[in-house]
Image (cartoon, rainbow, N blue to C red):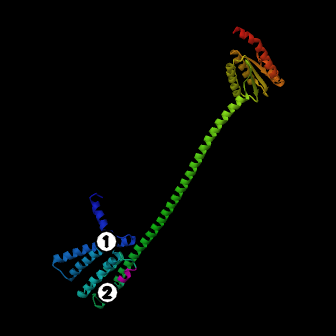
Amino acid sequence: MSTKNRPIISWLQQVTTPDTSDDNLRRQGFLVVIVSLAITLLALLLGLRSIIAGDFTITTAIIFGGMLIYIACGVMARYGIIRPAAYLITWTPWLGIIIIIVTTPNPTAIFFLSIPVLLASIVLSSLQTLPVTVLGLLITLFMISRDVVVEDGNFASAIFFVVTISALAYLGAWSVERALQIAREASQALQGANQALHDANSDLENRVAQRTGDLQQALQSLLKRETELHQTLADLRSSQETIRELSAPILPISAGVLVAPLIGALDSSRMMVFMSNLLRAAEHEGARYLIIDVTGIPVIDTQVAQVLIQAAQALKLIGTQVIITGIRPEVAQTLVGLGVNLGEIITRGTLQSGITEAVNRWHVIAPTSQALT
């Protein structure tokens, strides 16, 4: 469809659409407006034809009068006065037909009886067409009584014609009403389904929002617990480091003599920390002798023995002699069985003997060192 025709179509829709919010009345009013326009155009053409032909009769006057009435019906329907306009557009033809029958009896007038009935089937409901049908039958009987029907025996034909047209008009109006009723029921069912779907969507959105809120709250709680867990783990590691340092203290007992008692089970990480602490303490204190007491160690394996030997060798490089004390008989037997050679490391059975050994040695070399100084 071209763009030029759209303003025309929009104007026609605006002109033919009644000003009402009721769907049924809007449909009925639309039909009234359309029928009024169609009959007005037809009456205008017939009236102009009669004027041009010079045959201006009472029929022509009736046509022009009906045209004005139908124009009024269309205007009334357009501005919401629909039902009066529908009745007027249906009953107006009867007036013209009765005038024509009375003034100029014509056998063909019986065919005009179908016009009001057909109009009623278009703009009125099926029940509202019944009075129009009854009036058509009465006018038919009147025409027969006036001998308007041409031949005798046409009584049955006239009645059959009017009844058939009326029945078809009624069935047409009823079928349209039935179709509209089904459409309304389907529309209501669709609206109900749409409302149910909308309610379900709203409920689902609420549940999703609530679930999302719960998940966010759970996530925040989980993040908080994770932070607390990291903090606890950091505290635990710090505590472990503190415990390791406390479980292997390095104590000065005399000038140039340190004691480092070991307590509990030993592992590689603890021994490495212990070895590092020994080196720092020996350097810091200027120790000549460092006593490592292993009385509190239940088991010494090859790995622990190797760390002790490495610690003694490292300390010897910085001028500190290592004395190991507290080796119990079962530990000594285990070391011999493992083939561990403590080398030049001095060993004593008890911590007291080790301290005595270190102090005596220190007293021997201390005067010499002072003299050299």
The secondary structure making up most of the magenta span is helix
Which residue is painted at 33% across and 88% down in the image?
141
Name the residue that disc number 2 marks.
Answer: 139
Q: Quadrant of residue 109?
A: bottom left
The amino acid on which the numbered mark 1 sits, given as a three-letter code, is Arg
Name the residue that disc number 1 marks.
Answer: 78
**Image coords of residue 329 (percent x, y):** 84, 23
Q: Is disc 2 placed on a helix, strand or loop?
A: helix
**Image coords of residue 147 (percent x, y):** 28, 90
Q: Nearer the viewer, residue 202 or 59?
A: 202
- The quadrant of the image that shows the C terminus is top right
Which residue is painted at 67% across and 36% down in the image?
236
**Image coords of residue 298 (percent x, y):** 79, 28
- The quadrant of the image that shows the N terminus is bottom left
The CA distance from mark 2 to mark 1 is: 32 Å
Q: Is residue 280 above or below residue 168?
A: above
Number of numbered discs visible in the structure rendering: 2
Question: Does the magenta portion include 108?
Answer: no
**Classed neighbour count for the residue bearing mark 1: other residues with Cα under 10 Å, few (<14), some (14–19), many (≥20):** many
**Image coords of residue 208 (percent x, y):** 54, 54
| Numbered disc in front, either 2 or 1 | 1
Q: Is residue 293 visible?
A: yes
**N-terminal label among 2 and 1:** 1
Residue segment shown in magenta: 127-132
Whether tag 2 and tag 1 are in contact, CB under 8 A, the answer is no
The amino acid on which the numbered mark 2 sits, given as a three-letter code, is Ile
Q: Quadrant of residue 233?
A: top right
Q: Nearer the viewer, residue 80 or 163?
A: 80
Which residue is painted at 21% across and 76% down in the image?
47
